[in-house]
Image (cartoon, helix red, strand yellow):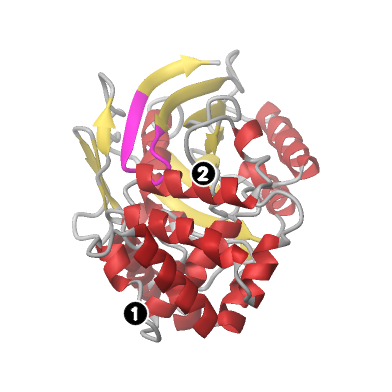
Amino acid sequence: MTSETGAEGAGGQGEVMQIADLDAAFDWQADHAAQNGAPGTARVVLAMKQVARGDTATGRRMASWPGLTLKDAVPLRLAGGLHHLLLTGEDARLALVYSGDITDQDEVDRRVAALVEAHDQRLLGWLAGPPQTNEAGRAASIMAGLLWLARRVHPRFELFELGVSAGVLTMIERYRFALGNVAVGPEDSPMRIAPEWRGESGPPPPPRDFAILEVTGCDVAPIDLTDDASALRLKSYVWPDAPGRMERIEAAIALARTEPPDLRRQDAADFASERLARPQAQGTTRAMFHSIMWQYMPASSQNAITAAFEAAGERATPQRPLAWIALETDPATFRHELKVRYWNGSAQDGGTHLLSHAHPHGAWVEWAGDAPQ
């Protein structure tokens, strides 16, 4: 599952993810939203402090939260519920907050408190599960990794993704990308991915025979974008004032309703093992990818996937290469880093290549090119 917790910004993961104090969690999450272009969302999160001190079921649930409130994304759980009220048209009191017409924190506090009082039991239900978003902007890094790989292995790819959520990134072959000076993907796509490209160079242009032959994905609880209620719940977790995010999720929903992504309800370790065991056609590269989900899996699953992949890598050949593309958070620097490993029977098989780091939602990509680890 591609869950989006508050720990998607600056600061060390070991320190940030351990935040248990509720006020500290609200402060950190609000600061992170503001730094990522969502000042209205930041004010709404700060207003939750007063909710947690109030006499509502939602406030009491937050105030008595057991364990690590930021790791559990408590602020973003309620933020999703509040946004859902606006999206459904049931209560529009936060519309002017998200638009930037209301910026006074005291007024935002009053509006959020009034919303919680009016919709207490409904909002309480949003605290029951973690937020889940599926940010298409991260596809820029995955596609850049594929283009880099296409110059080193067979450029015809059979892909599978772990933790797909709604499968937004599994539709990567249907997106139009502008990555620096490189354009790839169907020109008429409603999904336009064009991050600010940083660094002295960009990804290599696709070779003439570059192709994504298939993409499948798994999640323990996949979201069906063709279902109105499920799609609306996914949109609720998107920050409405963050530039481009709502437009991208709308484009993803439109594409899914044209042709749904191929998703399996399955444990990631089981799914990876099954995909690796399938016969692989000669002249194709089998590649696994995932984004901002690895840290949420238990160590046993991580170890099982790694062991299965490295065992499969030993069987890789120049005609049947294997690759692993990961856009994940570095626990020391908290940067979202793109790392690629590949196996094709050479002496360098399995080495890790750090290619770039990126904005949490794909607004920019800083390309390193190839920095072996």
Taking the image as shown, residue 324 lies to the left or right of residue 144, namely: right
Query: What residue appears at the point 43 percent right and 42 percent down from the top-left corner?
Result: 360
Whether residue 185 is situated above or below residue 205 in the rendered picture: below
Among the two numbered marks 1 and 2 on one chain, the one whose residue lies closer to the N terminus: 2
Image point (34%, 28%), residue name? 366
Q: Position of residue 300 (x, y in %)?
A: 80, 42
Numbered circle sitting on residue 92: 1
* Magenta run includes residue 161: no
Residue 342 location in percent, x, y? 55, 28
Helix, strand or loop under label 1 = loop
User: Which range is magenta?
Assistant: 358-367
Residue 330 in view in this figure? yes
Q: In this view, does 135 lie above or below 339?
A: below
Going by the numbered disc 1, the residue's amino acid type is: Ala
Q: Badge 2: few (under 14), some or many (20 or more) residues near its Cα, within 10 Å?
A: many
310 and 19: which is toward the camera: 19
Which quarter of the figure is the N terminus placed in? Answer: bottom right
According to the picture, the residue beneath numbered tag 2 turns out to be 28
Residue 205's spot in the image, x, y percent? 26, 32
| Residue 227 placement (x, y as % from top left) | 48, 80
Crowd band around label 1 with a 10 angstrom C-alpha radius: few (<14), some (14–19), many (20+): some
Residue 210 picture quarter: top left
- Relative to 94, is 362 above or below? above
For the point 31% across and 37% down, the residue is: 364
Q: How far apart are marks 1 and 2 (CA)?
A: 26 Å
Q: Can residue 83 be seen in this view?
A: no
| Residue drawn at 56 percent across, 64 percent down | 77
In-front residue for pair 242/362: 242
Q: Nearer the viewer, residue 164 or 68?
A: 68
Q: Is mark 2 on a helix, strand or loop?
A: helix
Is residue 359 a member of the stretch shown in magenta? Answer: yes
